[in-house]
Amino acid sequence: MQNQNTSVERLRTVHSVGDLVAYSSLLIPVVAIALTLTTYLLMGASVNPWGLVLVASGAYLVYIFEQMWWAGPEDEFNHAGRVQWQRDNRPLLIVTTAVASSLFILALGKVVTVFALIVVAILVVVATLYCIPVLPGKIRLKSIWFMKPIVIAIAWAAGTTILPMVLGKDVLVAEVWFLFAYRVAFLLPNTLLSDIPDIEGDGRAGLETFASRHRQLVQFAAATVALSVPFVGLAGHIALGLPVLIIIDGLIAPLYVRFCQPHNCAVERNYRMKLDLVVCMPVLSLSIYALFG
């Protein structure tokens, strides 16, 4: 009987930890750091620790504010478990938000430049327009059916390529702009496919998305872009002299193709976590190559 109770407690602990990882948005800073580290490696630039703090804390704040204070009605259908968990753990999330806000302000003070302030201001405006219905007709960018995956991919790419580079002396050279466009292509399959589990819930909330209107086209587009990313990286290596690391980075993108198949929406939490894992993978392969290649 004691063994059974111990097993039950272990399962509860595992479940609680799983909920914390899945619902607290603490994975967001991990993704942000992975992408930013990849940028430093691809540009051959020195890692700016405060730059990592700025990008990671800023990304976390955008997501946690959108989920806790700017949540749309679709979240009640698509992320009922997360919504309930965040309500139950609001004190914890207030603390993490306060910590992230402090780190963001501190990091911005450490690395502040005119270019950095401009990029941060643009990203804040985009996040506001995306989350809050302040556009004419009281709509959000998120509510425009084709905008959601594009805006998310561009914002993530800008925050993890342009922002880190404007913190130092290497400002917006051609290589940075190319890397920004390349990163948009790398992230677009993720943002396109992430909407598929939400099709039913978005419809119930009256939200029309690219995935709900053209599901098969979304899967085809995601697969096509994913398969083209290595060739985009190759073009950057040949035309701009970017390190061969960009080709290795690009070879990760075709992994998205395995998600371009019908799946059980009951496991949507794991589905998204696996999609985000693909986003993080390049930092590992590039680090190994940089150290031992």
Image: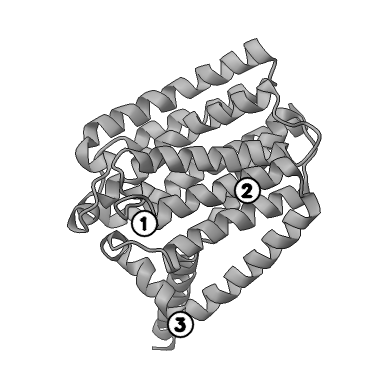
Residue 279: x and y in percent read 52, 41
Q: Amino acid at mark 2?
A: Val
Q: Is residue 288 left or right of residue 125?
A: right
Q: Amino acid at mark 1?
A: Pro
Instruction: Identify residue for label 2.
Output: 120
Q: Quadrant of the C terminus?
A: top right
How far apart are the two marked residues, 3 and 2, measured between alpha carbons?
A: 49 Å
Pointer 3 or 2: first along the chain? 3
Q: Quadrant of residue 206?
A: bottom left
Please name which of the two marks, 3 or 1, marks the residue nearer to the observer.
Answer: 1
Tell me, yes or no, if residue 289 can be seen here. Answer: no
Task: Indicate the colouring scheme.
Answer: one colour
Pointer 1 or 2: first along the chain? 2
Residue 216: x and y in percent read 23, 32
Q: Quadrant of the N terminus?
A: bottom left
Q: Residue at x 47, y 78 (%)?
A: 89
Q: Quadrant of residue 211?
A: top left
Instruction: Identify residue for label 3.
Output: 6
Instruction: Identify residue for label 1.
Output: 133
